[in-house]
Image (cartoon, rainbow, N blue to C red):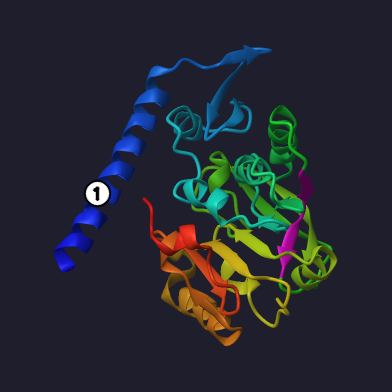
Amino acid sequence: MFRRLLGDQMRRRWRSFKGRWMQTLKNLASPPEYTTDGLEIVEINGVKLVIDPSVMSESVQERIRKGRLSLPEANFIGKLIEPGERFLELGGGIGYTSTIVAKQNKAASVTTFEANPQLIPAMKRTHAMNNVVAEAVNAIVSSRKDRDTVPFYIHEDFRCSSLVKPGGGIKNVVEVPVMSFQEVLQSRSPTMLMVDIEGAEKDLFQNIDMSSVKKVYVELHKNIIWGRGIKRIFDFFSDNQFYYDPPASVGHVVLFRKLDNPPPVQMIRRTY
């Protein structure tokens, strides 16, 4: 019995590794699909993305060309969407993951918040190019709203832009509107959250009613929030009847699932 289970596990891992390797070779070998106005366009996971040097560092451009943007969550998010899902994303970037979600044609609504105003046009362009409907909002979502705007540090690598002042590489500092997390939850009634907000997750989850939410996919930035911040997040979800769901959790990207929301059969086994 043990040998059979071990053999099945090894075969699944080999098939997954082979598939990822073949996709990487395809991404490296295939030239860009086409260019428009001098901008390169590539496709990864069925999503067309514009490589725009005005908002992307060379590192981000290369990750897109190699099909490695927003890993590992981009490989899992589509499998987590259930029919009628109301999807809410905090930290939308250029609209890649929200487009993956919308292209499943299962979600009742897709809303994504992004603090960096320079990325909103890029996000809307991604949605339009891929013929999906998603709401893009330029705002910072905070557990409490004690001011109308807050400073946001735009990094040369947009993935590192943050409310927390980085050590270097700052392109600009802008004032961004603030919205209350509780008000956002009440107005959208999301069933699933996806959160990638560069360390601000530490203070987001406190004194919040998340009764409509069934799943939360959050990227933990240990180098910013450290062990105490991670413990605070896990404690919050445990206190609110969520559990850590291993099949879709990889490293610092963690899925919390409501106890009364069992995973679909295809997610019970880990397929990577």
Picture residue at 72% right of the left edge, 67% below the top = 142
- Decide if residue 148 is on the left or right side of residue 220: right
Q: Which residue is mark 1?
A: 11
In this rendering, does residue 253 appear at all?
no
In this rendering, does residue 188 appear at all?
yes
Which quadrant of the figure has residue 251? bottom left
Picture residue at 69% right of the left edge, 44% below the top = 105
Q: Quadrant of the N terminus?
A: bottom left
Q: Is residue 266 above or below residue 131?
A: below
Percent position of residue 195, x then y = 60, 60
Q: Is residue 10 above or below residue 200?
A: above
Percent position of residue 110, x then y = 73, 51
Extreme residue in the left direction:
3
Secondary structure at numbered mark 1: helix
Q: Is residue 37 above or below residue 28?
A: above
Q: Which residues are magenta?
A: 134-142
Predominant secondary structure, magenta span: strand
Percent position of residue 228, x then y = 46, 78
Identify which residue, 74 or 37, lies in the foreground: 74
Mark 1, residues whose alpha carbon is within 10 Å: few (<14), some, or many (≥20)?
few
